[in-house]
Amino acid sequence: MPNKVIRTYINSIKELCPNITDEALDYYASKLTISEVKPKFFYIQAGAIQKEMGYVYSGLLRAFYVDGSGKEITVNFAKEGNYATHYTTFGTDKPSKFYFQTIEPTVIINISYNHIQDCCDRFPDMERYVRLIITEAHNNMLERMEGLLFESAETRYLNFTAKNPDLFNRVSITDLCTYLGVERQTLTRIRKKLLKD
């Protein structure tokens, strides 16, 4: 299985950046490791320094923090084809503010910060790939922030289900509510209304 997992990941890089050389991809793949973890596994702990990021080959994680009252607030989901990382602290000496916990059995490809830096120094096309990934993460974060600021609860729910139809039955209502920034009763009301329409 490891070869299939790594090969699938490398092919996804090649699709996004077709000019990356096989030499660069082979070098990049040479230091990747794979973790197969069960549900409720903490891939990243809040307060810990993050030295690796993970590419989700299969499974699902949620990123969350614990507010002052002890409530878990979900800020993101990382599904197949996504990276599980706290981008603003990855590769720094700053601790992550978020927990990344698996929701279901998950296979993650681990990539160390030092290896990414080494690859970018050796192969300029790898740096382009990293820039594209960071830009996508940045745009997703801004889109989410704007949604929380300017969109109604119903619009946020509709946008989430349109962008993530595969997640609807994989995440708990509680996690979805905190992600959308709505109370459970509000989400129930929205879903009933949409079923009638």
Image (tube, helix red, strand yellow):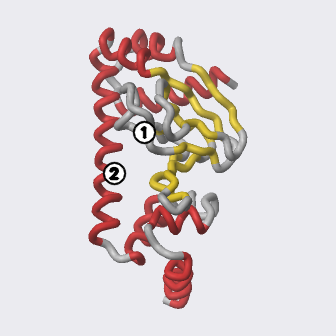
Quadrant of the rendering where the N terminus is positioned: top right
Q: Position of residue 80 (x, y in %)?
A: 55, 43
Residue 111 picture location, percent across and down:
49, 23
Q: Quadrant of residue 134?
A: top left
| Helix, strand or loop at mark 2 | helix
Query: Can you identify the residue that label 1 sits on?
Result: 86
| Residue at 48% in and 12% down | 26
Residue 9 percent coordinates (x, y): 52, 29
The answer to whether residue 122 is left or right of residue 44 is left
Name the residue rendered at 47%, 52% in the picture.
76
Instruction: Say which quarter of the image contains residue 91.
Output: top left
> Which type of secondary structure does the marked residue at label 1 adopt?
loop
Q: In the rendered view, would you say 37 is above or below 67?
A: above
Please tell me which of labels 2 and 1 falls first in the chain.
1
Residue located farthest toward the bottom when viewing the structure as drawn:
196
C-alpha span from label 2 to label 1:
11 Å
Q: Position of residue 138 (x, y in %)?
A: 30, 45
Q: Going 40% across and 76% down the picture, which residue do you hit?
A: 153
Q: Nearer the viewer, residue 3 or 54?
A: 54
In the picture as drawn, the residue positioned furthest to the front comes out as 68
Is 191 left, or right, of 28 in this rendering? right
Q: Which residue type does callout 1 highlight? A: His
Horizontally, residue 153 falls left or right of residue 36, namely: left
Q: Sort mark 2 into few (<14), some (14-19) or many (20+) by Cα contacts within 10 Å.
A: some
Q: Which mark is residue 50?
A: none
For residue 5, above or below residue 137: above
- Foreground: disc 2 or disc 1: 1
Q: Which residue is mark 2?
A: 141
Q: Is residue 53 left or right of residue 5?
A: left
The three-letter code of the residue at mark 2 reads Met
